[in-house]
Amino acid sequence: MTHDLDVALLVGAAVLLVAIGAVRFSTRLGVPSLLVYLALGVLIGRSGLGIRFDDAELTRMLGFCALIVIIAEGGLTARWSTLRPVLGLATALSTVGVLVSILVVGIALHLLLDLDWRLALLYGAVLSSTDAAAVFATLRRLRLPPRLVATLEAESGMNDAPVVLLVVLLSRGFPLPHPWWYELLLVGYELTAGAAVGFAAGHLGRLALRRAALPSAGLYPIAVVGFTVLAYAVGASVHASGFLAVYVAGVLLGNARLPHRQAILGFADGLAWLAQIGLFVLLGLLVTPARLDEAILPAMVAGLALLFLARPLSVAAAAAPFRFGIREQAFLSWAGLRGAVPIVLATIPLSARVPGADRLFDSVFVLVVIFTLVQAGTLAPVARRLRVTAPAEPAEIRVETAPLERMRADLLQLEVPAGSRLAGVHVDELRLPLGASVTLVLRDGTGFVPGPDTRLKVGDSLLIVATDGVRDEAERRLRAVSRRGRLARWFGETGNDSGD
């Protein structure tokens, strides 16, 4: 037994270190690192090193554990000020959008591939959830308007909850054990109760950690993660949506300005990376490469129906009551990334022994690989083509320093791209609110502390310290000057993310 443990630790450590090194390698090649992790799982599996693993139920349970950590990290890093304006659209995408996507994909597969309705709708349900890990890892490398990023991240954090419920429901088969209206009410209860449990757990965590004087700074990140896991466990115990509870608790804790906040975020980020690596390698182990050629046709039909019909229609239906333009809706449609979540969801009917579940799992695996390469690799050019980029948008830099902690301040980075009206503006003409200031300018590889009369140039990189109370106002002012120059207020430019 000890020998087996030693071998398992050796293989696990080697895979982990290779996966970490692959992040840098994949970034240089422009290939999503998540696909590298899948490839690692396949290489050490039965067709590579010969490790045999075919336990779908264990994969589902471990996959759920990994998703708890990934969703918690997404909630902890979400800013309420950017999340609040898009909460309605994100909720609509996670409910109405999910139903539209399931129906469109299901109808397409039933008509084109002659699948029975149950299996066709299962394809639609499994593929209807965007992946939090893929969205977080990809979008945060791009400079996009905050409300676009917030919408996609909130959707990926929220839509797992209803999709898991629907996949479980469809895996039970027809006829349903209760009338359709009862099942609909049950889904509504689970979502509402999940949000309430998450709010309670997050609020309890805020009160406890603000008042507690823990003996070590390293205990605070562990406690925060513990409260998010508690939210899931309590939610699942009362038959509510545990995933929604995790996200809500994460948002509350992440916006609470807890002690050692940067350490908390850094720990959650590292834990989420570990969960992503483990999850994708595990899913790669579960795949049988010899069967994948038979899954290419259903994967391509489902993927094309999803990309060009289901996703655009679901976005249009969800965005109808909100002020989102055609270009923004087009980007939301293209940026609905799929990753580990659909593969994990495909293990539910696999473990329930639903007829055709093997082909469903293989098809979802093929689709995720192909479409992640296509979509993730083209997000940047698509954003530029649709003119939804925001190169002058400030980005937060996570650093753990005592002065910033005591000031309750964040460190922001701002680039001055070509075409920005920031070029030519003096630092004092930025008119940043009291509590925000430009502390360093990096120009031509040299950094210096700017004075009030320092004139900004194209290519400059600014470091800005902004306290929590004025950060949103400072970002709006920088956005306004970037659009209309030093006289932005005279032109009525407010710097709102909507462009008003």
Image (cartoon, grey):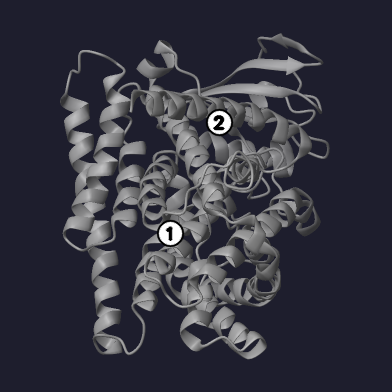
80 relative to 19 in the view: left or right: left
Distance of label 2 from label 1 (alpha carbons) = 38 Å
Q: Residue at x 78, y 13 (%)?
A: 445
Task: Determine the image quadrant of residue 500.
Answer: bottom right
Q: Is residue 270 above or below residue 106?
A: above
* Vertical relation: 158 (above or below) 232: below
On the image, the x and y values in percent for residue 414 come to 66, 29
Residue bearing the label numbered 2: 15
Q: Earlier in the sequence, mark 2 or mark 1?
A: 2
Q: Residue at x 61, y 40 (%)?
A: 40
Q: Position of residue 263 (x, y in %)?
A: 40, 22
Label of residue 87 in the image = 1
Q: What is the three-letter code of the residue carrying label 2?
A: Val
Q: In the rendered image, which quarter is residue 480 located in? A: top right
Q: Residues within 10 Å of mark 2 (few under 14, many from 20)?
A: some
Viewer-proximal residue among 411 and 347: 347
Total labels: the figure holds: 2
Instruction: Identify which residue, 424 or 71, lies in the foreground.
Output: 71
| Element carrying mark 2 | helix
Q: Disc 2 vs disc 1: which is toward the camera?
A: 2
Quadrant including the N terminus? top left
Which residue is at a point 27% across and 58% down the rendered structure image? 195
Residue 114 point in image, percent of width and height? 61, 89
* Disc 1 crowd, CA 10 A, few/some/many (<14, 14-19, 20+): some
Query: Is 279 situated above or below 179?
Result: above
**Residue 408 makes an appearance in the image:** yes
Give the residue drawn at x 59%, y 39%. 44
The image shows residue 231 at horizontal and vertical percentages of 24, 47
